[in-house]
Image: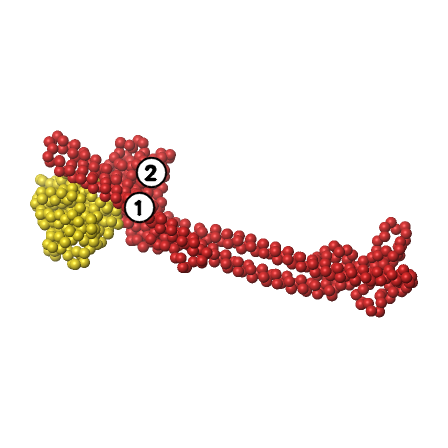
Amino acid sequence: MSSSSVRPWLQTLGLQLVSGFGVALAAMGASLFLIFALFSYFNLYSTLHAEIAGRTQFLVEIYHTQGLERLTDIVGRQGFSDDSADVLYFLEVQSLDQADLAPTFSYQNTTRSAIEFLLQSLWVSNETQPKMFAETTALSNQLMLTVGRFYQDEFSAINYLIGKVALVIAVFWVGAMLTTTVATHRALMGTHRLGTELRAIMQHNLEGRLQRESVSPYLRELVDVGNDMLEHVALSLQGVRSVSDNIAHDLRTPLTRLRNKLTQLKPRVPREYENTIEALLSDCDDLLASFNALLRISMLEAGSQIRGDAKQVSLRVVVQDVVEMYEPVAHDTGVLLDFQAEYVEQIRGETDLLGQMFANILDNAIKYTPLGGVIKIRLERSGIEQLRVTVADTGIGIPDAERNQVFRRFYRVEPSRGEHKGHGLGLSLVQAIAFYHRASVELHDNDPGLRVVVCFPVSLVP
Amino acid sequence: MKVLLIEDDSSVADFVASELALKGHNCECASSGTEGLMAANSARWDALIVDRMLPKLDGLSIIKSLRDKGDLTPVLILSALGEVDDRVKGLQIGADDYLVKPFSSEELMARLEAIHRRIAPLGADFRTTLEADDLRLDLITQEVRRAGRVIALQPREYRLLEYLMRNAGKIVTRSMLLENVWGYHFDPQTNVIDVHISRLRQKIDRDFDYPLVHTVRGAGYRFGDE
């Protein structure tokens, strides 16, 4: 119930926060990268396009002014003397009967349109073969001029730049992720620690307060609110206690008077009324017993649970004592008590409360088990973390529907009303004492009879 | 016995005083904490009965200040606060017994006499046998004989008898038995103690001319005759 149940949840939250942020940041980085790359490639395309357009324009002018021969000559020599080796000219003649004019010139890795250029730059950028960009112009109906340009050098330069940008973005991303992870972890651990601390205070020591100085500034407000709440809880608890104390004082004192006056009256009344006085005294005592049990239940339920530094108690000894105490009672009603106990660890507990608890359970079992019945009492280890005390009788049991209600105050199973003496608080008190010891109480059908199972945690957090 | 009662509820004080007087004890009352402490310091008392919630100075502070001075007068706390930790706190601070209101006069007298006895024969109780009438209990061999006949007792019956014999002639209440013979302080619901007593009676009383364990109606038991 402690830290183990909180951690996976926190881890999930942390993972969600960090991965969400990581994905968003990565998307942003990728977009930035893409935009930069597209822009660079488009820039290169524009340059190439302008250059090719210039050269084409020049050749078209030569064709028109100096004729086909001069053009063929230039194309045949592959350019002018000042042209770099990167340029390629290609002239072709197509017969008229061909339906549509399309340049037949081709070269591996040749791109012709802007879109094609950009797409190929992005997707086949790693190819080592020289890349070419070409544009074709129709000089006449049959004559096509294609000007191509190799751009491997420019392309490599741009790719180098783009690679650097990608690296910068990646480094930035990794850095951001690390910072975020650390920050998130610290923030969540801060919250987690706060939760653990708060839980410890609630369970063990309501006087404790959260430390304001030891947490990050953004958690201080939470600490303040938490401390205010603890203050409030402590005050309410104090209220409950003082109300109980006052009730105790205010009700017990008049009851004392009543009882005392009855006692003093007893020797003075005529003999025939003596029994009435006895009955009144006994009513008085019953009232007080109910009242004390009720008060004790309230105190146990309102107060904090047992602390890890409470006294060590041998459950075996307590159960054994109570069994021994009730043995003659069981014997007189013709019921057999069968007690078996393993040697188990001591637990943290209050001897008197535990004694009261098992006395109540055993008292019920004996009351509701008919002549010749057997009550089995077992103390054993259950798993690594629990000690289990089972009291199983062969009596009338409790109907399924009512099994959970019997823990309610003053609740009594219908047929037992009037038939058996009791104030209907026995099991409520058992449950309150179990709560105080962080133990659980369960009722099961023993077929026939009732099986009461109380499980105690072996170790309490100190 | 000279008893000082520190109690602010005049009705309870009146009741206790009259009950004490009835038993031939001498009782004085103080109705506030400071008054009580002054009275406790100004004379020698055989026992103090102190209420916990008092005006001006509470009962526990009175006991603490007496104990700090080395005053070992037996103290019985009388209180409406009856929770386990209230009791433990009271006994830890130096009280000899703790009685929760309301109480019967028998319970009060029995406990008062018990704490008084506990202190009185200081160092005198080196007895190795307890004897009453024709019953003899050997504390060393744990052998019990009545009229010369050995009686076999269960360990708990032996301790019950020992406690009764040590308090022979005085009333012991059921809760005193539960606390001193079993070592528990709780409400045993059924009359568990009565059943144990009747078992003991079967062994030590049934086959003999007259009984030694007597029931005191509305109070508890008494061993032997006064």
| Residue A113 visible, this orientation | yes
Q: Which element carries disc 1, helix, strand or loop?
A: helix
Residue bearing mark 1 = A239
**Residue A242 appears left or right of B97:** right
Camera-nearest label, 2 or 1: 1
Coordinates of residue A216 in the picture (x, y in percent): 45, 58
Q: Hey, what amino acid is under mark 2?
A: Arg
Kindly indicate whether the residue at mark 1 contacts the one at mark 2 (C-beta within 8 angstroms). no
Q: Earlier in the sequence, mark 2 or mark 1?
A: 1
* Chain holding disc 2: A
Relative vertical location of residue A327 with respect to residue A194 in this rendering, above or below:
above
Front residue of this view, candidates A438 and A458: A438
Coordinates of residue A141 in the picture (x, y in percent): 89, 53
Residue visible at 31% across and 55% down?
A309
Coordinates of residue B174 in the picture (x, y in percent): 18, 43
Q: Which element carries disc 2, helix, strand or loop?
A: loop
Give me the chain that's yellow.
B
Q: Quadrant of the C terminus of chain B?
A: top left
Coordinates of residue A281 in the picture (x, y in percent): 18, 36
Residue visible at 24% across and 51% down?
B88
Q: CA distance from mark 2 to mark 1?
A: 23 Å
Give me the chain that's red.
A
Dividing the picture into quadrants, the one containing residue B206 is top left
Residue bearing mark 2 = A408
Q: Hey, what amino acid is under mark 1?
A: Gly
